[in-house]
Image: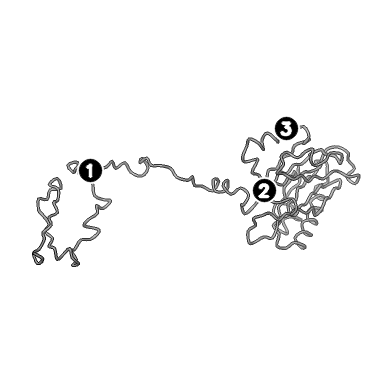
């Protein structure tokens, strides 16, 4: 009959210590509240499992630290930067004083091929490359996706050997068409190669990057070298106000905390 109450009985396990039966009427199941809450139907985390419970309910409670579970994508700043190697806010730079780049090209090519952190590096900056104008760029190109820019010593430096700087730009980070050489400065005290780059990805705060690769010879006048560097950086800051200025290189015994550089809070 339609008006007959259909009784449902929910058996509560005797192992829990309760022998009672909960009686629900058909009317309760047809729309009226039966008074069940989440607290009454779910075990709280603080409930201690009873060994007398059925095996279907019991589970090993080893704690979060000891529990084994599948690992997902690895977290951490280093892994996130590795995944977006050419879209980082600031470029990754490898700086080395090679003391002749020509006899280290095989090692550089091998590292680019087999080491991901070198291959994905945005900029390779070398001091004391010992290159001369007779060496073409394609002869020292370590891989086809790197563009080469180097500066040779002139007669103004008063030296024929040693020195010289070289910068290699990863084309996956910045196309060679977006690389502009701002200055090639060579004096007895300072060698400076400044490149303006506009990579594919840029943070909103910058319109481009200016990479200044510096080499100060050990026998140079350090105060004069820092003054020349300060003048060049000040000029770049005035002409390119929305550009991030990055200075790398081999400064030997020059004190970068000297007043000429610290006065303008220039990055070094």
**202 relative to 225 in the view: left or right:** left
**135 relative to 250 in the view: left or right:** right
| Mark 2 vs mark 3: in front | 2
What x and y, as percent, mark residue 138? 79, 40
Between 68 and 130, the one lying in front of the other is 68
Helix, strand or loop under label 3: helix
Nearer-N-terminus badge (2/3)? 3
Q: Residues within 10 Å of mark 2 (few under 14, many from 20)?
A: some
**Cβ–Cβ below 8 Å for labels 1 and 3?**
no
The correct choice, above or below, for 262 with respect to 166 in the image is: below
Rendered image quadrant of residue 140 = top right
Q: Which mark is residue 106?
A: 3
Residue at 67 percent of width and 60 percent of height: 206
List the residue tagged with mark 2.
172
Label 2 vs label 1: CA separation?
56 Å
What x and y, as percent, mark residue 158? 90, 43
Residue extending farthest front: 1
The correct choice, above or below, for 253 with respect to 240 in the image is: above
Between 257 and 120, the one lying in front of the other is 120
Between 266 and 7, the one lying in front of the other is 7
Residue at 78 percent of width and 46 percent of height: 149
Nearer-N-terminus badge (1/3)? 1
Label 2 vs label 3: CA separation?
22 Å
Q: Residues within 10 Å of mark 3 (few under 14, many from 20)?
A: few
List the residue tagged with mark 1.
56
């Amino acid at each position: 009959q339609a008006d007959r109450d259909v009784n449902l009985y929910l058996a509560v396990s005797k192992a829990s210590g309760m022998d009672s039966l909960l009686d629900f009427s058909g009317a309760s199941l047809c729309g009226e509240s039966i008074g069940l809450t989440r607290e009454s139907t779910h075990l709280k985390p603080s409930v201690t499992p009873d060994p007398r419970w059925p095996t279907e309910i019991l589970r090993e409670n080893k704690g979060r630290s000891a529990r084994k579970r599948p690992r997902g994508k690895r977290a951490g700043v280093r892994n996130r930067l590795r995944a977006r190697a050419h879209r980082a806010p600031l470029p990754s730079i490898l700086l080395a004083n090679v003391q002749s780049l020509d006899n280290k090209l095989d090692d550089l090519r091998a590292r680019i091929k087999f080491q991901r952190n070198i291959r994905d590096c945005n900029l390779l900056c070398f001091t004391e490359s010992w290159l001369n104008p007779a060496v073409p760029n394609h002869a020292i190109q370590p891989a086809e996706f790197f563009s080469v820019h180097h500066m040779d010593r002139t007669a103004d430096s008063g030296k024929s050997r040693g020195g010289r700087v070289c910068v290699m730009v990863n084309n996956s980070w910045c196309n060679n068409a977006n690389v502009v050489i701002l200055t090639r400065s060579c004096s007895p005290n300072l060698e400076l190669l400044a490149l303006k780059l506009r990579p594919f990805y840029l943070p909103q705060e910058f319109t481009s990057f200016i990479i200044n690769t510096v080499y100060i010879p050990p026998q140079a006048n350090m105060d004069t070298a820092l003054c020349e560097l300060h003048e060049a950086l000040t000029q770049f800051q005035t002409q390119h106000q929305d550009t991030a200025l990055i200075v790398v290189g081999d400064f030997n015994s020059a004190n970068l905390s000297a007043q000429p550089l610290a006065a303008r809070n220039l990055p070094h």
